[in-house]
Image (cartoon, rainbow, N blue to C red):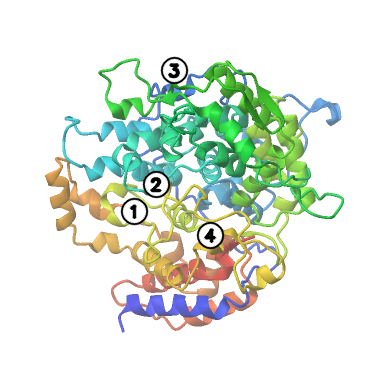
Amino acid sequence: MTIKCTIQHYAFALLISLLVGCGGGGDSEQTNNSNITNNNSNQNSNSGQDNSNNGNSQTDTDNSDQGDAGQGDTDQDNDSPDNGTQEDDTFASMQNVSRFIQQATFGATPEQIRTLQGTSASQWFKSQLEVPASLVLPAVVAAAPDDPDDEFNLFHIEQTSLAFWRNSIAGQDQLRQRMAFALSELLVVSNAGGEVLTDIPEAVAAYQDLLIQNAFGNYRSVLELVTYSPAMGHYLTYMGNEKGNEQTGRMPDENYARELLQLFTLGVVALNKDGTAALNSEGLSVELYDNTDITGLARVFTGLNLNEDDPEELINTRFTKPMQIFPESHSEKEKTFLGLTIASGTDAQSSITQAIDHIFNHDNLAPFVSKQLIQRLVTSNPSPDYVSRVVAAFESGKFVLPDGSSVGLDKRGDLTATLAAILFDSEARQVASNTGGKIREPILRFTHWARAFNVQNIEPKYIPQLWETGATADLGQHPYRSPSVFNYFRPGYKAPGSKSAEMGLVAPELQITNASSIPGYINFMTYFVMGQQQEADLDELKEEFDEIGVNFDLEKALQSFKPDYGPLLQIAQVPAELVSYLDLLLCANQMSTQTKDNMVAALSKVPNDDDDGYLPRVHLAILMVMSSPDYIIQK
């Protein structure tokens, strides 16, 4: 049996043996992790990418509460002692740093754990608000063929994915990137269909940038930008939506109206402020609307289509601009929904503004949106009190950080205040119970590995495995390629026959976890953990690059995503130290004693190799940790 097969066997066997326990009962805080050192000083934040404002007019909409301006407001709370800075002990230990950073970013790095210990998490949060945004569209535009009539160009099409991997792993704006990804799983657009949104990558790239640039903005502004987005217009089929015609029986397309209410803003039943269902006198949930509301709202979203200000402009460029209103296609009829009536004859822009305002101010919106953002960042089953506290920040538009300073613009829907409330809440900062936490999405597991081990040469274009990771035989999830508008998984999903479902707990990510995805994930990670890219035969890939006229640097290709295991090799002679290091770095010291004992026993059987020293032991240790329920369940 080869070393690779042996390592895969050990990792898979450990995962299966521990699935019944699901880990998480970690030891008390440890202090023997002093080997965490600065390994990321040379990490490139943007991989040479031009992240300046690219002129994307999606951010030109004049909304006074739009964007990020002023989100780092540091005015002291009136109740603060002496109106000065208070003590912020959020980062009191390396374990605390590791937990917080894993929730707030795409993965903790050794440098962060070492340097942030004892500093102010409030200051870190505010500093992240000021980091320039790492964008996607510039990379897509740069890779576009010189001749727009050129044949299908896979390299151009895949840039939305390649830029995502670069930004999520190496971007310095980690908090922004993580929040944008969370929003993308609520306000879903996908280019998985192999149609227009695949063939015109600028569309989804512009949509990604819309969320990135407004990740610290206001949800009201985001809803308006999303509504006018060509990517969303095409995805939910209201681009070119015509007003009804009684003679022909034509009715306005209802797709966006339905999903705007059901998935993006309100849900389907009335909610209390704590996210629980509001019940009527008979103890039953109350439905918010029926199809007549959808029909009325659908009339609002008629008359939108691609911008035609410049008829000579390439269609790829037009997909980066907000959709244009064509008055002759907009319904002039009265529009009634959710208790609001927009008078007949109201123009399209006014109708859209009134509709979004009305939906945005609905009582359901704050708990519906807040709870899902908590699920994406911290825990699948937040307590009603936790949801209530985040809802309060969402509605007030302000949150007081642990150091006494505040963030937010005092406007309902402020996403900076909401994000801070999610991350700094007491329920987020305490180690979760056996019913708390969340399953890490496969995408987050991979980015965490890349950041934790300071991968060099972050050039995903040279790694075909990263061009499509959605198959269950691979990572089982691909950025911006969910199978439908319902995301990769539903927020209320309960795995049939599972213990969690029996306890009434939701586990959204289990919807993409099955007998194929578990070994698929381990095999996918094995390729990267063991550095197989550095030994890959890239002749076929070079031929593809040559065919489309893209420069292929063999040395960069072979060194792409090369991990730095130097710190681990220094301690690998003692398996217990190796496991302890990985426990802090990857699990925030939450691995159970049983898990660690099993790993130490297995690692002790991996001898020092004549050629590679203890490298096989390091490979196995990483795979075992990242395949264990203690890691996969983020607590």
Q: Is residue 433 above or below residue 382?
A: below
The answer for how far apart the CA atoms under marks 2 and 1 are is: 8 Å
Q: Label 2 is placed on what type of residue?
A: Trp
- Name the residue rendered at 47%, 80% in the picture: 13
Residue 54 at what x, y percent from top left?
38, 24
Q: Which circle's residue, 1 or 3, is located before the other in the chain?
A: 3
Q: Secondary structure at mark 1?
A: helix
Q: Label 1 is placed on what type of residue?
A: Leu
Residue 542 at what x, y percent from top left?
16, 51
Q: Which residue is under mark 1?
A: 466
Residue 499 visible somewhere in the drawing: yes
Q: How many marks?
A: 4
Q: Nearer the viewer, residue 149 or 87?
A: 149
Residue 251 at what x, y percent from top left?
49, 34
Q: Which circle's residue, 2 or 3, is located before the other in the chain?
A: 2
The answer for how far apart the CA atoms under marks 1 and 3 are is: 45 Å
Mark 1 vs mark 3: in front: 3
Residue 48 visible somewhere in the drawing: no
Q: Secondary structure at mark 2?
A: helix
